[in-house]
Image (spheres, rainbow, N blue to C red):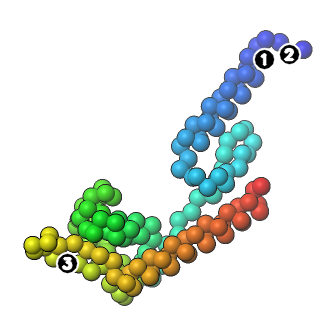
Amino acid sequence: MIDLDKRLYLFKVRLHALLEREDSQKRSKDTSGWQTIISGGSYVKVAYKVWLDKNGKAFGEGPYKLLKLIEKTGSINRAASEMEMSYRKAWKILKIVEKKLEFELIERKIGGMDGGGSQITDQGREFMKSYEKFRKEVKTSLEKIYKKHFS
């Protein structure tokens, strides 16, 4: 029979592992559900970043999110504000991406009576659709590979 001190110690260890697991789940932004419990009750998960490269990063999550917000708001300024970045930084990102991709993503309408605004070009919209499909396929493929090796 295990004495009281050992039982208390085992209880503390189990409680600590449960609290650590709960904390880890709260901190995790991964909603895909592909996490694996390893020894000690802690979790591991796959993490990755994917971007398109052309002599350096040409397009990834940041520019994609910026374009989605421009599409939603009709404004570089409002999109930048929602991403908590300056208009200047957003504009600079767009110019760099457009230069690397060698086509315009945004049609800009300068001020005036209607107040200006921005909209995604047809080519930009098609590019975004391709990027969305690409991202989804990468995620699906990584999930299969992850499950193959860690399930």
Q: Which mark is residue 2?
A: 2
> Mark 1 — residue?
7
Residue 109, position as x, y percentages in the image:
19, 78
Picture quadrant of residue 143: bottom right
Q: x, y percentage for residue 12?
A: 69, 22
Q: Quadrant of residue 92?
A: bottom left
Report the residue marked by disc 3. 109
Looking at the image, residue 22 sits to the left or right of residue 62; the answer is right
Residue 90 visible here: no
Please give the name of the residue rendered at 75% of the width and 56% of the height, measured from the top-left corner.
Answer: 150
Q: Quadrant of residue 76?
A: bottom left
Q: Amino acid at mark 2?
A: Ile
Q: Nearer the viewer, residue 62 or 69?
A: 69
N-term-proximal mark, 3 vs 2: 2
Give the residue drawn at x 55%, y 71%.
Answer: 135
Image marks 1 and 2: residues in contact by CB distance under 8 Å? yes
Q: Amino acid at mark 3?
A: Lys
The mark closer to the camera, 1 or 3, is 3
